[in-house]
Image (cartoon, rainbow, N blue to C red):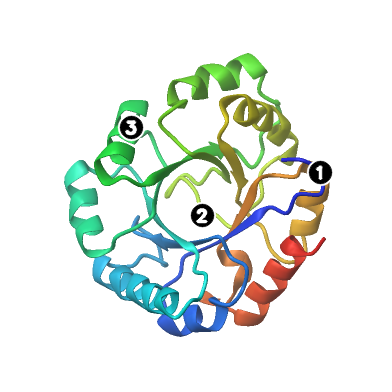
Amino acid sequence: MAVGTVPTVKICGLQSVEVLKSIVHLPIAHIGFVFAPSKRQVTAEKAGELISFLKSEEAKGVSIPLTVGVFVNPTKEQLTDILAVAPLDVVQLHSQETPDFCRWVRQHFQVKVFKSVSISKTENKIPDVEDVAAQLDPYIGTVDAVLLDTFDPVYGGGSGKTFAWDCIPVYQEWARSADVALLVAGGLQPDNVDQLITAYYPDGVDVSSGVETDGVKDIAKITAFVERVTRK
C-alpha cells in the first residue's frame, strides 16, 4: 500500500443484528462471521439473518460491507451447506487449506478467498523472501488476500495477541508482487492500530476482541477503531 492510502477495516466476530444496526453507517469494508469453533461462532442461520439485514439496508441505498465467513479446515460439504443459507461474499480460510482447495472455493461459489498465515507471537527470525515465496507462491491466482494473524495453538488465529510486526514487510513485498491484498490481524485495538499503520501501511486491518468489552462488541470501541484507521 502506498503511504497516505487509507487501509480497509474488517470487523470480525459479529453475532448481533443490533450491533450491525449501530455500525452499518461506518466506513467498514468487511464484516466477519466466525464458523470455526470459537466463543464468537455463529450458525449458518444466524449469519443468514445478519446478511439479510445488510441486504435490506443496501436496498435503501446504504453502502454495506462485504460479508466474510471465517473457517478452519472446512470440508466442501460444510461450505456448501453454510453458503446455501448464508450467501457470503468472501471465504476466509485459517488452516492447512491447499491452493487447489482455495481455487475450488473461489470458482465453485464465485466468492473472494482470503488465506490466513499464522505467525508466532515470539517469532524471533524474520523469514527470507525466498521462504515466503516458497510458502505462498502456490496460492497466486487462488486467493484475493493474505491475512497475517497471530498463531493460536487451539484455533489457529483469533488469539487477541499481536505478533512480531517486523515480519510484515517481507509478506508485504510478496503480496505486492503477487497482486493480492495484505491484511493484518492479531491483537489490534484502537490504541495500537495507529502505530501499525504508520509503520507498515497494510492494505487492511482486521479486529475482533480488540473492540469488545467483556466479550461483547463495544460500539464505542468499534467507532474509535474505525476513526483511527480512516482518518488522514
Q: Nearer the viewer, residue 38 or 206?
A: 206
**Earlier along the polypeptide chain: callout 3 or callout 2?**
3
Residue positioned 63% across, 65% down in the render: 210
User: Where 185 falls versus 192 (above or below)?
Assistant: above
Q: Nearer the viewer, residue 141 or 97?
A: 141
- Is 95 displayed left or right of 175 in the figure? left
- Looking at the rendered image, the disc whose residue lies closer to the viewer, 3 or 2, is 3
Q: Which residue is mark 1?
A: 3
Q: Element under label 2?
A: loop
Q: Which residue is mark 2?
A: 158
Residue 192, position in %: x, y? 76, 59
Residue 88 is tagged as: none
Q: Residues within 10 Å of mark 2 (few under 14, many from 20)?
A: many
Q: CA distance from mark 1 to mark 2?
A: 28 Å
Residue positioned 35% across, 55% down in the render: 36
- Looking at the rendered image, the disc whose residue lies closer to the viewer, 1 or 2, is 1
Q: Amino acid at mark 3?
A: Arg
